[in-house]
Image (cartoon, grey):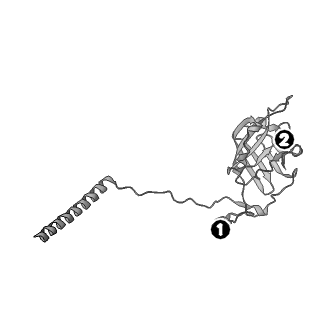
Amino acid sequence: MKNKKNKILVTVFSVLIVVLAVVTVILTTQKTPKTEPVITDPPTETTTMEPLILLSEIKHEFQEKEIIGRVVSEDLGIDCNLVFGTSDDCLRLGAGIHKTSSLPGYSTPPVIAGHVQTVFVGFQNAEVGKTISVEMPYGTYVYKIAKIEVIEKSEFDFSILNEPIKQAIFYTCYPFGKVNYVKTKRMFLYCDYVSGDRIFDDVHFTIPDELKNNIKHPN
């Protein structure tokens, strides 16, 4: 008799476990709505159709005061030498590119200075949308003025030299006319890249296979 009662209790307990399991499944299904599949964007291409110049195939090391190119703008009336360095001696020879900034064609911006009374007198004609070109032995780079800013020279943040932006930055003293005090303000032209072959630094980095067909060798 006792064994019969035990069997009945085991059976009832087993049924209760099954019922609880079924109820749990039903409640879980109701509380967790069916989610839609996540649709992701297709992977972006790592290649570029832009022609690339190899750094190892162009001259990229210069001496201070060396003339390395030209700055030209029909819109602003500028046509002058581009000199390596921004010392007073350099700026007597033309516009000067900061030695710590990049050459045109890099992914970081070149920063170029010039005297407003001489080579950059055309800054007085600066307007957003006008263009400035930098002519280098390895190619011509065209930039379009995107922003004009007048600030104290101490306010310019030179950390921008390390920013991966497709721009060139030109600047000169401000105001334009002669004054009887030391000018502390500067006018900056932030110019967006329009055209010109990009430089790949194969001196320090390996060329990815997908970019090898884009390499343009100098004549």
- The quadrant of the image that shows the N terminus is bottom left
Q: Residue at x 29, y 54 (%)?
A: 30
Q: Which residue is mark 1?
A: 209
* Residue 194 place in picture, x, y as percent: 69, 49
Please state which amino acid type lies under the numbered disc 2: Val
* Residue 109 place in picture, x, y as percent: 72, 49
Kindly indicate the quadrant of the structure image that contains residue 47.
bottom right
Q: Which residue is mark 2?
A: 119
Q: Residue furthest left?
A: 1
- Left-right relation of 118 to 202: right
Position above or below: 48 against 116: below
Report crowding for label 1: few under 14, some 14 to 19, many 20 or more residues within 10 A (C-alpha): few
Q: Secondary structure at mark 2?
A: loop
Q: Residue at x 13, y 67 (%)?
A: 5
Which residue is at the front of the view, 90 or 143?
90
Query: Residue 160, can we see it?
Result: yes
Q: Nearer the viewer, mark 1 or mark 2?
A: 1
Q: Mark 1 touching mark 2, by CB under 8 A?
A: no
Kindly indicate the quadrant of the structure image that contains residue 54.
bottom right
Which residue is at the front of the view, 35 or 40?
35
Upstream in sequence: badge 1 or badge 2: 2
Report crowding for label 2: few under 14, some 14 to 19, many 20 or more residues within 10 A (C-alpha): many
Q: Secondary structure at mark 1?
A: helix
- The quadrant of the image that shows the C terminus is bottom right
Query: Residue 218, can we see it?
Result: no
